[in-house]
Image: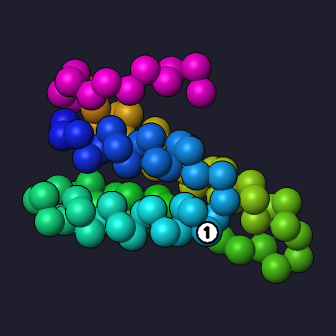
Amino acid sequence: MPYILEELYDKIDAADTMEQYHKIVPEYIEKLEIEGYENVADEVRMLSEVYINRFTKQATFENFENSKKKVTDCLKKRASYDGSFRINKETK
C-alpha cells in the first residue's frame, strides 16, 4: 500500500479533537481519490462520520473515538493484504 495510507493512519491516530479529525479526513479523501484509491476514499468517508449527541458531550466523544478506531482498523486491514504497510501499532 502507498505511503499515503500510512500517513493518513498516523494523522488520524494523532487527532485528539473532532476539529482536527474533520480537517484531516476530507483532505486525505481528496488525496486518495487523486491517487486512484477511490474505494479506500469511499470507505474512509463512510467510516469517518461522527454522530453528534446533542444531549451529552461524552457520547459525542465516544462516537468520535469509535469513528477513529473504525478508520484505523480499515487501514490496517487493507495493509494486511499487501504486507508492505509499516504500521506497528498493534497494541492500540
Question: At which x and y percent is residue 69?
Answer: 56, 44
Q: Is residue 52 left or right of residue 10?
A: right
> Local crowd at mark 1 within 10 Å, few (<14), some, or many (≥20)?
few
Q: Is residue 55 left or right of residue 45?
A: right
Question: At which x and y percent is residue 5?
Answer: 29, 44
The range drawn in magenta is 81-92
Q: Residue at x 53, y 43 (%)?
A: 13
Q: Residue at x 85, y 60 (%)?
A: 58
Say whether residue 50 is visible.
no
Q: Residue at x 76, y 65 (%)?
A: 60
Residue 67 in magenta stretch: no
Query: Which image quadrant for residue 78?
Result: top left
Say whether residue 82 is visible.
yes
Question: At which x and y percent is residue 17?
Answer: 66, 59
Question: Residue at the left extreme?
Answer: 36
Question: At which x and y percent is residue 43?
Answer: 34, 58
Above or below, comparing residue 84 to residue 56 in the picture: above
Q: Quadrant of the N terminus?
A: top left
Amino acid type at image mark 1: Glu
Q: Which residue is mark 1?
A: 19
Q: Quadrant of the C terminus?
A: top right
13 or 43: which is nearer to us? 13
Q: Residue at x 58, y 20 (%)?
A: 91
Q: Does the magenta stretch mainly form a helix, a strand or a loop?
A: loop
Above or below, comparing residue 3 to residue 31 in the picture: above
